[in-house]
Amino acid sequence: MNYQLQSAKITSPSSDRFWGGCLVHEDLVVLAEIETNGGTQASHLGKSVFDQILRKYEEISVIDKNAVKILLSEITGLPHLKTAIIGLFSENQIYLGCAGRGQVVLYRAADVGTVVSGGFISSGEIIPNDRLVFHSDRLAGILGNEALAKIYKTDKLDVLEEELAAGLSSDQKSKGCAVLALFVTGKKAAIKYPFTDRIKSSTFFAKLNNLNSAFQSYFYTKTKRQKITLFLLALLLFFFIINTAARYFQKINSQKEKQAIQSLEIVKSQYEEAQNLLELNPVRSRQLLGQAKFTVSQMLAGSKKNSREYKTLFEMFEKIAETEISAYQIYKLTAVPLFFDVSLIKSEAAANSISSYQNSKVILDRQNQAVYFLDTSQKQSSILAGSDTVKNGKIITNHGNFAYILNEDGIYSIDIEKKSADLVIPKDAGWGDIAAINAFAGNLYLLDRKNNAIWKYVATENGFSSLRSYVNQGVTVDLSNMDNMAIDGSIWVSGNEDIIKFTGGNREHFAYQGFADTITKIDNISTGDGEKNIYILDKSLKRIIVFDKDGLYKSQYQWEQLGIAQAIIASESEAKIFVLIDNKIYAIDIK
């Protein structure tokens, strides 16, 4: 790097679950934040991440964007890693990459801008007086935009470090947060090494020279016999020192070897126990594998490459990593069979959204202003409604023998058998931004983001009741970012990385368990009263993650095409997850 760099590493206190840390090493800078379920110390896992990055960094010969990708790939997918930001410097260039939820903000000549954020890699030129701040999105949520803007513009590292450290230490919510600030101060000066002058002027070397002169004066005054005796005594003393040192280092190495053997035996025991518990207790199995992997990674960091010990440890590391895939029940799919092509119902038909009730699926085609029906048990299909009913309809749902579509006039009910439609709920002036509609037990539920509400219409003999709020009075909740809703007796709503569960109009606690990975964006959810689990579509990492309804992690399906999926519908009775992609429905077998 051609510039001088000043850095400030600010971390809040860690806990068993949360840890944050910064690393500045040669031309490498790293910020990482860890969150675990408490089974393994977060600090141990964090240091393991740094060790993995440093180990890979030593193998890199060229610093560029690809080098950042290589370092990120080393840690991407670690279930406990919430945020990792990596920076590499080469001459006057910086290369940045971010995994998870974080960002790097550049302050230059009174302008502030984000230069990299989660999931991206970027590069650019740095100049004197540039200021770079690395932090997670979690920190942004804790401090707020105003406080962050002040941090970005602080022109003194010691002031930034003092104020920010004090603020993070006093806020319990910030445990495990980290901030890395880098100031580019100017060109590096040529380094001179006046070692000769330093040695001459050094008090130590002057004393050593005097001692040598005194010894020579003493030695040359002795007889030849005395000189031989002194030489033999010096030789014996030399061999005694060498022998003592050799025995000492042999003892140290023996102790280290003994400790390494004991550690490896513990790792093997943890690995074997984890394998035995894969089916019986996958949560415990994952904990044991995480502990074993951490221990092996620490031992690898202290082993010489190309040694027999390193090879043994690396083989063990790979075995643990491979078993983790089974423990986390990660199914990597290379091909998923096509289940149904919507164009078979009607030429040039499109599929914008899909809803399910048991084997009955209804599909909304906004382009052709149509609603289609599909029986997935027999693959029978038909056209249910056309432009007179659909109009500018944007959301569809179904229950029993009826489909319901929301359009500019209100909510239409479509009789699936008769293929007739009626306006059952006129558009209400109280509606705001309706993001989702669901039918359950004959009743209709509308997710209204603008009014921060879930509206309920109760089925009656003559149609539906008037609008009422499903959420009980006094229950505080923010639904402004929610865009998905599923019902199984309880109501599940999701948006960004959050899932909120309501039962009987009250908010019910729901949290992920046995899963320390990061879900940056929930793009779709699926569950129902016939399903034991809840299914989450994460397009950014091209996967479907499965939890039971208590939040316990079960499994995940990874498929490249999930990155462009429009919706998912899980049907445990059919043992399939239906995936809507580009007017086609694919079926993933539930394992």
Image: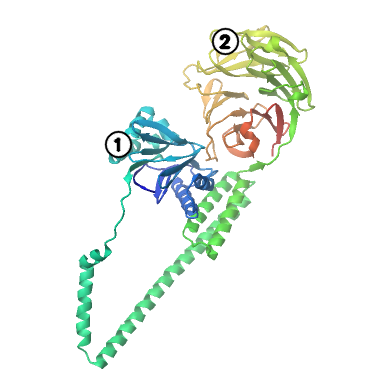
Confirm whether residue 534 shows in the render: no
Amino acid type assigned to the residue bearing label 2 in the image: Leu
Residues marked 1 and 2 touching at CB (< 8 Å): no
Which residue is label 2 attached to?
Answer: 467
Q: Quadrant of the C terminus?
A: top right
- Residue 284 drawn above or below residue 260: above
Badge 2: residue crowd in 10 Å (few <14, some 14–19, many ≥20)? some
Badge 1: residue crowd in 10 Å (few <14, some 14–19, many ≥20)? some
Q: Position of residue 191 (x, y in %)?
A: 31, 55
Secondary element at image label 1: loop
- Residue 422 drawn above or below residue 577: above
- Residue 530 drawn above or below residue 205: above
Is residue 268 left or right of 53 when viewed as pictured?
right
Which numbered mark, 1 or 2, is in the foreground of this view?
A: 1
Quadrant for residue 174, please give it: top left
Is residue 432 left or right of 150 when viewed as pictured?
right
User: Residue at 40% across / 43% down in the picture?
Assistant: 14
Q: Position of residue 236 (x, y in %)?
A: 33, 84
Task: Pick the residue in front: 37 or 345.
Answer: 345
Secondary element at image label 2: loop
Which residue is label 1 attached to?
Answer: 155
Confirm whether residue 222 shows in the render: yes
Amino acid type assigned to the residue bearing label 1 in the image: Asp
Is residue 165 left or right of 323 when viewed as pictured?
left
User: Residue at 43% across / 33% down in the picture?
Assistant: 114
Task: Pick the residue in front: 222 or 438.
Answer: 222
